[in-house]
Image (cartoon, grey):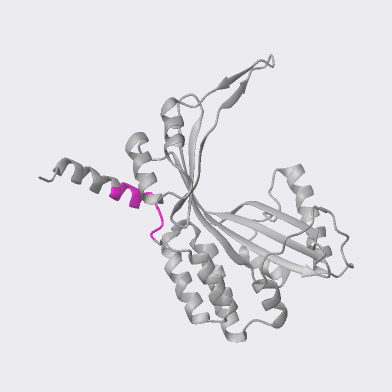
Amino acid sequence: MMNWKQVCTGTLLGTLVSSIGLPSQAQDTTGKLNQAICMEDWEGAIAILDHIIPDYPKSQNTLAEYRDRLQKLSETGLSEEQKAQYCSPGHPISPNPNPVPLNENSLTRRVSRYYDEELWDYIHTSREPFDSDGRSYEEITTFVEFPGRISNLSYYYSWSAENGTYLAATFSDHQLEELSADEVIDCQENNECDRISPPAEFERLVERFEVGMNAQAVLQAIVRELGKPSLQRETVVYSWQFQEGETFCTIDVDFSNDKVIGSSFGCGMLPES
C-alpha cells in the first residue's frame, strides 16, 4: 500500500527544490552550445541558449547580452581569426607564468596592461579586476575583440550554522560538483584563536554524498535535513582564449546574478612538440 505521507513529503520537497532554482536541464548544454557556434549553426545555438535562460533568472541580463552577440554573429559569421580563437581547444601550457608579450599592440600586451591596471584598482579599492563600473559581458567582448564562450553554468547553495560555519554545495550540469563544510578560525584581539568545527550533521552530509551524484537527489536530501538554504547564487563563467606566437592566454570572468564576482588572466608558453 502506498504511504501517502511519503508521497506528500516528496511533493513538498520537489516544490521547494523548484522554488529555490535548481536548473531543469540535465545535459551538458555548454558543450553543445559552443559546438553549435563553432559549426556556425546559429539557429541551433540560439535555441540552446533560449532553453538555458529561463533556468537562470538572476543572470538573464548577462545571458541576454550573450544572445545579442550570437544574433550579430549569425548575420556576419565568424571571421577566420574569431574561429581560431573561439573554436581552438585549450592548449596545455608550460609552467612559465610570465611569457614575454609580443609587442605594444598585441592582444596579449593590451589585456595584460589592462588587467594590471584593474588589479591595482582592486588592491586599493577592493574591486575585482574587470569589475569597474559593473563591467558587462558585452564590454569585455568589445575590449578583447572576439566573443567569449560559456565555459560553466552552476548553482551554489549554503546553509549556515549558529557557530558561524556553513555547508556549501555547488551543482553543475545537473550533478554535484562540490560539497564542503570547513572549520573556521575565530581570533580575538589578544591574538588567541579558536578552531570552530562544523556541526556533526554538516560533516555527515559531506561524507554521505560524492561528486557526480544527481543534483536533484542531493539537494532534496540536504533540504530535508537542514531546510531551505540561507544563500543561493547562480554563476555563469565566460572564457576568452587566444594564442599569439608561442604564447597562449586565458581570461575567465565569473558573473553571478549579473554581477562580476571573480576574474583571472594568465598566459604561458606552449610546450615544444
Can residue 146 be seen from the camera position used here? no
Identify the residue at image location x=62%, y=64%.
Answer: 137
Q: Is residue 247 left or right of residue 207?
A: right
**Position of residue 62 measured from the top left corner of the image (x, y, whole percent):** 55, 63
Q: Is residue 26 magenta?
A: no
Residue drawn at (38%, 49%), measured in percent from left and top? 20
Answer above or below: position of 184 versus 248: above
In-image side of 239 versus 7 (left or right): right
Q: In which image quadrant can residue 249 be found?
A: bottom right
Residue 79 in percent (x, y) is at: 68, 82
- Locate the C terminus and report the quarter of the image it occupies: bottom right
Span shown in magenta: 14-24
* 165 w.r.t. 157: above or below: above
59 and 39: which one is in front?
A: 39
User: In the current view of this chain or complex, which residue is farthest to the left?
Assistant: 1
Is residue 19 within the magenta segment? yes
